[in-house]
Image: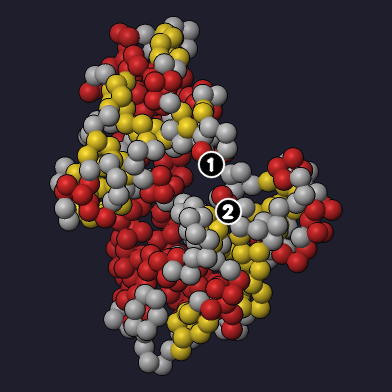
C-alpha cells in the first residue's frame, strides 16, 4: 500500500531514487540578494521556494544571476519538466511541488529547492507531481522531516519516497485528466487577479481629485474577540491561517480541539490583514460559512467595517499598494521572519478615501468584483477537492480513467 492507499496488484511500488536520473538541490550565490540582477539582463534565473507552488510555478519574484554564478550552479541547471520540490520551509512553502516551465530557462535552483529529473522511459513528470502534491502524500513527506521546527527533507529521504507506478500510458492519462482541473483552477486564479485590479481601479478613480485623507480607523474597527478552540470540543471549524491563505485563500476545515491556543473569532463582515512580515502582502476577504464557527490565527488582524455596508471599501483600502508600503514601514522586530505590525499602528495608518458621502456608493461598486472573485475561489476550491478525490480512486482501480475524465468534463 502506498501513501495514498491501495493500488492494483499488478503495479509495483518504487523508491523515487530508482525512477530518477538526477536528484539534487543548489545554493544561493555568494552575496545573496545583493548579487541578483534583473531577469532581462540575467544569464540564468534562480528558482527559489517562493516560486514553487503545488502544481503551479509562480514567476513573481523570480530573480536573475550572472554568468559566473550560473556557471557555479551548472550542476543544478533546470530542464523543462523537471519536477521541483521545496525541501525546506516553515510549513507554508515546505513540500510544495510543480513542473519547471520552459519559458523560465535557463535556470538553476537554490538550496531550498530540489530538482527531480525522471527517467522518461519509466515515469511521467505530470503523474509524479500529481502524486507528490496529493494531501496524503504531503503528510507522508512531512513524516521524514529532519529539520525540527523548520521542516526539511534530505536527498536520501527523497530517494526513498515510495511511489506506485502504473504503465506509462496510464500515467499519461492520469496526469492529463488532472491537468484539466489545474487549467480551470489557474484560469479562476487569473480572473481573480484581474478582478482585484478592477477593484483597485474603482478605488483609485473614487479618490481622484476629491479624495479625503483619513485613517484605517475611520472605516474599520479592530476586533479582538477570541476563543479557546478546545472549548468547542470536536466540532469542525473553518480555520483561517497564513498557510491556508498562501495555499489558495480558502480556510481549512479542522476539529476545534486540534487547534492549539486562543484564536480570533472571524465575524461574517470582517477583513483579515496579516501583521506578520507585511512585505509579503496577505489581506483576506473571508466568506465564512453560516454552518460552522470561523477562527483565525492570531497572526491576523481582524478588522470590521465601521458600517456593515462598507466591507468592500475597507478591504480595497487594506489591499492597496499604498497600504503595503505603509505596513512595511511600520514593522517591529529585528529579523525578517519575525517582523510584525502593531495593531494600534495599523489603525492609525493614513489612507486616501472617497469623501464620506460617497463611501456607500463606492462600496456597492466594489461589491461586484469581490463577490465574483469569491465565487471563483469557491469553485477552484471544489475543483481542487475533486482532484484530490480522483487520484486515489484512479490509483486503486475503483475509478477508471475514462470515468474520471467524464466527471472532470462535467465539473469544468
Element under disc 2 = helix
Give 253 or 126, whichever is nearer the viewer: 253
Is residue 59 visible to us here?
Answer: yes
User: For this view, does 164 lie left or right of residue 237?
Assistant: right
- In the rendered image, which residue does mark 1 sit on? 337
Query: What's the residue at 32%, 9% (across, down)?
Result: 356
Q: Quadrant of residue 174?
A: bottom left
Is residue 188 visible to us here?
Answer: no
Q: In this rendering, is residue 33 above or below 225?
A: below
Element under disc 1 = helix
Between discs 1 and 2, the one toward the N terminus: 2
Image quarter of the N terminus:
bottom left
Residue 199, label in figure: none
Label 1 Cα neighbours within 10 Å, binned few <14 / some 14-19 / many ≥20: few
User: For this view, does 109 lie left or right of residue 16?
Assistant: right
Query: What's the residue at 31%, 24% (across, down)?
Result: 222
Query: What's the residue at 65%, 54% (across, down)?
Result: 47
- In the rendered image, which residue does mark 2 sit on? 49
Q: In this rendering, is residue 232 above or below 383?
A: above
Give 104 or 260, whichever is nearer the viewer: 260
Amino acid at each position: 500500500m502506498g501513501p495514498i492507499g491501495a493500488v492494483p496488484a499488478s503495479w509495483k511500488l518504487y523508491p523515487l531514487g530508482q525512477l530518477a536520473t538526477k536528484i539534487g538541490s543548489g545554493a544561493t550565490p555568494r552575496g545573496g540578494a545583493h548579487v541578483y540582477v534583473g531577469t532581462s539582463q540575467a544569464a540564468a534565473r534562480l528558482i527559489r521556494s517562493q516560486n514553487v507552488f503545488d502544481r503551479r510555478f509562480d514567476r513573481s519574484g523570480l530573480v536573475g544571476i550572472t554568468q559566473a554564478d550560473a556557471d557555479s550552479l551548472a550542476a543544478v541547471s533546470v530542464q523543462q519538466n523537471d519536477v521541483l520540490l521545496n525541501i525546506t520551509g516553515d510549513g507554508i512553502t515546505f513540500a510544495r511541488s510543480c513542473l519547471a516551465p520552459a519559458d523560465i530557462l535557463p535556470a538553476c535552483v537554490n538550496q531550498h529547492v530540489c530538482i527531480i529529473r525522471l527517467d522518461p522511459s519509466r515515469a511521467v513528470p505530470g503523474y509524479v507531481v500529481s502524486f507528490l502534491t496529493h494531501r496524503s502524500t504531503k503528510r507522508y513527506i512531512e513524516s521524514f522531516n529532519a529539520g525540527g521546527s523548520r521542516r526539511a527533507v534530505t536527498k536520501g529521504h527523497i530517494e526513498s519516497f515510495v511511489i506506485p507506478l502504473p504503465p506509462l500510458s496510464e500515467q499519461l492519462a492520469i496526469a492529463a485528466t488532472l491537468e484539466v482541473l489545474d487549467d480551470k483552477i489557474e484560469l479562476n486564479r487569473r480572473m481573480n487577479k484581474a478582478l482585484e485590479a478592477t477593484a483597485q481601479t474603482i478605488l483609485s478613480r473614487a479618490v481622484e481629485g476629491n479624495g479625503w485623507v483619513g485613517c484605517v480607523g475611520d472605516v474599520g474597527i479592530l476586533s479582538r474577540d477570541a476563543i479557546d478552540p478546545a472549548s468547542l470540543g470536536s466540532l469542525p471549524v473553518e480555520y483561517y491561517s497564513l498557510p491556508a491563505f498562501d495555499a489558495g485563500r480558502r480556510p481549512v476545515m479542522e476539529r476545534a480541539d486540534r487547534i492549539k491556543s486562543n484564536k480570533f473569532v472571524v465575524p461574517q463582515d470582517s477583513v483579515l490583514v496579516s501583521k506578520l512580515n507585511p512585505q509579503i502582502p496577505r489581506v483576506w476577504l473571508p466568506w465564512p460559512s453560516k454552518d460552522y464557527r470561523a477562527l483565525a490565527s492570531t497572526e491576523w488582524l481582524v478588522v470590521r467595517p465601521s458600517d456593515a455596508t462598507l466591507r468592500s471599501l475597507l478591504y480595497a483600502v487594506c489591499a492597496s499598494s499604498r497600504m503595503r508600503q505603509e505596513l512595511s514601514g511600520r514593522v517591529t522586530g529585528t529579523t525578517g521572519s519575525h517582523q510584525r505590525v502593531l495593531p494600534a499602528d495599523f489603525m492609525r495608518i493614513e489612507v486616501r478615501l472617497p469623501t464620506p458621502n460617497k463611501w456607500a456608493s463606492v462600496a456597492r461598486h466594489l461589491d461586484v468584483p469581490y463577490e465574483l472573485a469569491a465565487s471563483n475561489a469557491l469553485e477552484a476550491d471544489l475543483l481542487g477537492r475533486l482532484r484530490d478525490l480522483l487520484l486515489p480512486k484512479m490509483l486503486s482501480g475503483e475509478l477508471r480513467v475514462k470515468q474520471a475524465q467524464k466527471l472532470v468534463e462535467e465539473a469544468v
